[in-house]
Image: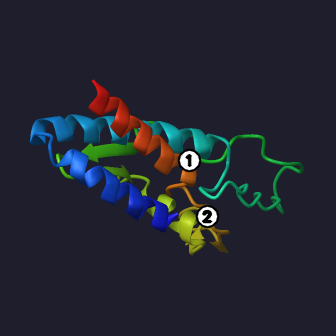
Amino acid sequence: MVDRLSRAEEWASGLLGQLTPAQRAVLAKGLAVELRRRHSRRIAEARNPDGSRYAPRKPQARRKKGRIRRAMFAKLRTARFLKTASTADASVLHFTRQVERMARVHPEGLRDRVEHNGPVVQYPARALLGLADADVGRIADVVLDFLSR
């Protein structure tokens, strides 16, 4: 995927060099919004960027029996917490400060407390952000659509 992304970057650099900074900023904003939409959809489907499913939740030992029926990261994938930032040179997708700890623990599979004075738990790795091959293709489509206007 990295090879494909670098080839796409080389391909687009010549075309983007002809745009004004204002036009590049508009394109970067459109790319950031599209990437947020795709990442939000992927998080809702509980899929890693490579297409595999997230590791399932652990069963609750002391509380109600049965599985938790809520979707994972329901609030995390909203535009309130999943933000975009763009300039003429870059598009960035990031989480707000309120949830950045949780958004850092899950993708890396780190240890963290479940609640304030709760037990420390090892979380399985669940990648929230990342580029899939389909995302790279979609980036190329957005760039071509923008340039054709």
Q: In the rendered structure, are the residues bearing label 1 and label 2 in contact, judged by CB atoms less than 8 Å apart?
A: no
**What is the crowding at mark 2: few (fewer than 14 residues within 10 Å), some, or many (at least 20)?**
few
| Image depth: mark 1 or mark 2 in front | 1
Q: Amino acid at mark 2?
A: Val
Residue placed most toward the observer, 147 or 72: 147
The residue positioned farthest toward the right in the image shown = 65
Quarter residue 25 falls in = top left
Residue placed most toward the observer, 52 or 9: 9
Quarter residue 51 falls in = bottom right
Q: Residue under circle 1?
A: 134
Q: Residue 94, position in %: x, y? A: 37, 52
Q: Amino acid at mark 1?
A: Ala
For numbered disc 1, what is the local secondary structure?
A: helix
Q: Residue at x 67, y 42 (%)?
A: 45
**Left or right relative to 40: residue 29:** left
Q: Residue 124, position in %: x, y? A: 67, 69
**What is the crowding at mark 1: few (fewer than 14 residues within 10 Å), some, or many (at least 20)?**
few
Residue placed most toward the observer, 3 or 110: 3
Q: Coloring scheme of the render?
A: rainbow
Q: Is residue 75 visible?
A: no
The residue positioned farthest toward the top in the image shown = 149
Disc number for residue 114: 2
Count of marks, rendered view = 2
- Compared to 95, does 118 lie above or below? below
**Left or right relative to 97: residue 74:** right
